[in-house]
Amino acid sequence: MAERILITGANGLLGQAVMHIFTRESDFELVQSSVEDKPFINFGSEYYKLDITNKEEVKDAVRRFNPKIILNCAAFTDVDKCETERELCWKLNVDAVKNLIIASRINDAKIIHYSTDYVFDGKNGPYDETATPNPISFYGRSKLASENALIASGADSAIIRTMVLFGLGVNVKPNFALWMINKLKAKEPINIVDDMSGNSTISDDLAYGSLKLIEKNAKGIYHIAGRDIESRYDFTMKLCDVFGFDKKLIARIKTKDLNQPAPRPLKSGLITLKAETELGFTPMDTVESLRFLKYQLGN
Ligand SMILES: NC(=O)c1ccc[n+]([C@@H]2O[C@H](COP(=O)([O-])OP(=O)(O)OC[C@H]3O[C@@H](n4cnc5c(N)ncnc54)[C@H](OP(=O)(O)O)[C@@H]3O)[C@@H](O)[C@H]2O)c1
């Protein structure tokens, strides 16, 4: 009988990419779960409505499906809202992970969890897995607390840190690349920061990297992100080249001009060498991932 993976938050951007890639590329039996009543895409897997902030629901799900792996794609990902809705942020990003840990003890399931470059302060990136975290936002603190909860629990687990996720999905929240494509297609001018750097990651590539991690039965922390470490402005220039947009529509600005509630790590970036050497993960570079997105968009 095929081994099962319970995927939480499967209606989100990463969750949909994971469902798509794992359905196509693996023999696992997938249980697609999220808070909504229905799946946003029907992948032919069983769908189970699961709110991971509810400890009993999570335990019931583990008893019912006996998954070998719980892959946690659910999170409170609105970085600015995390500053003002702190209780909700903590409940989903930290307490819910503790629910997964407790439930995993029922059948010794392995937990695979996602974290972020926001655990770093962005003073001297890019960072490898041994760098010391120092979050500067509430979101970053919550994600670091989730990492620490997993590590301290001793549960069989792996943590995948990623950054600036973009890609296509049904009903997903707007992401950096799609926002720019919509604006530039309509010939609307946009302001892009040139003092924030890191690697942008297409969700499909992250899903591939996650599958490699599972196949290698890897444990501990891995950085999985796009190949190129560059400023948001340079990313946007490449997007204009790939999609044929007018670069004159782009104005350079500084991050402080945006007056965002949550501070951002500026000189960030995740070094992916460990995932490349240990997992055989080959990250797409920016142009490759944008070409792939263009193909997915059908233009
Ligand atoms: N997006 C990025 O740029 C980025 C960067 C670095 C790391 N990450 C990490 O990558 C992971 C995936 O992010 P993503 O961009 O795919 O996020 P996403 O699109 O916001 O997906 C998260 C999903 O979790 C669902 N959810 C919310 N509350 C839930 C609950 N109580 N129980 C179960 N599911 C619940 C959400 O549903 P609703 O939409 O209905 O709330 C949503 O479908 C997260 O751990 C995130 O921290 C993301």
Image (cartoon, helix red, strand yellow):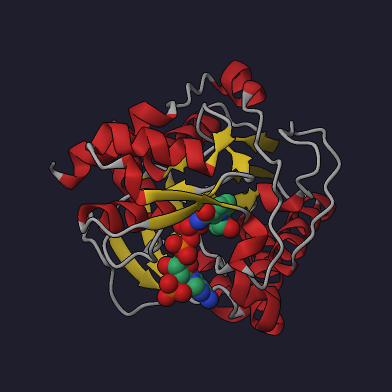
Residue closest to the far front:
248
Residue at point 26%, 62% (across, down): 170
For the C terminus, which image quadrant? top left
Nearest the viewer among 85 and 196 is: 196
Report the side of 116 relative to 72 (left or right): right
For the N terminus, which image quadrant? top left
The image shows residue 220 at horizontal and vertical percentages of 72, 38
Q: How many marks overall?
A: 0
The image shows residue 17 at horizontal and vertical percentages of 35, 48
The image shows residue 160 at horizontal and vertical percentages of 61, 42
Residue at point 34%, 44% (across, down): 248
- The answer to whether residue 139 is visible is yes
Residue at point 71%, 63% (across, down): 263
The image shows residue 218 at horizontal and vertical percentages of 63, 31
Report the side of 212 relative to 221 (left or right): left
Nearest the viewer among 38 and 136 is: 136
Nearest the viewer among 48 and 241 is: 241
Q: Is residue 75 above or below residue 85?
A: above
Nearest the viewer among 88 and 256 is: 256
Report the side of 259 relative to 42 (left or right): right
Residue at point 67%, 47% (across, down): 117
Report the side of 135 relative to 159 (left or right): right
Q: Is residue 111 above or below residue 230?
A: below
Q: Is residue 86 above or below residue 239?
A: below
Quadrant housing residue 96 = bottom right
